[in-house]
Image (cartoon, rainbow, N blue to C red):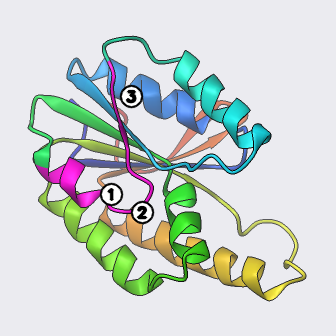
Amino acid sequence: MLPKLSFVLGGAASGKSVFAENLILNSGLKPVYLATSRIWDDETKSRVKVHKSRRDHTWTTIEAPFDLQPALSEAKSDRAVLIDCATMWLTNHLLEEHNLNEAQTLLLSALSASAAPIVVVSNEVGQGIVPDNALSRTFREAQGRLNIALAAQADLAVQVVAGLPNVLKGTLP
């Protein structure tokens, strides 16, 4: 049985999205994909295409670059929701100069209130060098705070490295 909230963390191209998709598919529930990425350029378009190619017709896809609450509140307990990913969601808010603390509070509340089990994918961005510009440093700090809050609220937290899961909290279903 899929926990109420699962948090899947990893570096870029670590296999975290595939792992999270499999958690959803193995739940036996109807899969819902909340897509947070906005298409900025050809590289992003290509990455989105790869993600889409892995999902068949059984997935319901909802584009939600900012406000996840409506989709989360509508999701019933017979659904399993994948949010891919918190990093793009945060990037969207940061670039639009939204209040990040308020956005995070609203997200955590929506996650808690949803009837459906949820899997949130996020990037670990704090293990590299200190960025050389203020915007990147602001993002890194905000992403770290968001990841800490998501992990604290999650029943299951998994770090994916080279496609392999490392359970940080809870038990895999």
Q: Amino acid at mark 1?
A: Ala
Q: Earlier in the sequence, mark 2 or mark 3?
A: 3
Q: At x 37% / y 76%, what residue is drawn?
A: 103
Q: Are marks 1 and 2 in contact (CB under 8 Å)?
A: yes
Q: Tell me: residue 82, above or below residue 102.
A: above
Which quarter of the rendered picture does the N terminus lie within?
Answer: top left
Dot 2 lies on which element?
A: helix
Mark 3 or mark 1, which is nearer the start of the sequence?
3
Q: CA distance from mark 1 to mark 2?
A: 5 Å
Q: Which residue is mark 1?
A: 154
Disc number for residue 23? 3
Name the residue: 53% across, 24% down. Answer: 52
Query: On the image, numbered disc 2 is attached to which residue?
Result: 151
Q: Position of residue 15 (x, y in %)?
A: 64, 33
**The C terminus sits in image quarter:** top left
Residue density around tag 3, few if under 14, some if 14–19, many if 20 or more, within 10 Å: many
At which x and y percent is residue 80?
24, 33
66 vs 105, left or right, is: right
Q: State left or right for residue 79 relative to residue 129.
A: left
Secondary structure of the residue carrying tag 1 is: loop
Boundaries of the magenta span = 59-73
Is 163 left or right of 2, judged from the image as shown? right
Nearer-the-camera pick, 4 or 142: 142
Q: CA distance from mark 1 to mark 3?
A: 14 Å
Residue 131 placement: quadrant? bottom right
Mark 2 nearby-residue class (10 Å; few <14, some 14–19, many ≥20): many
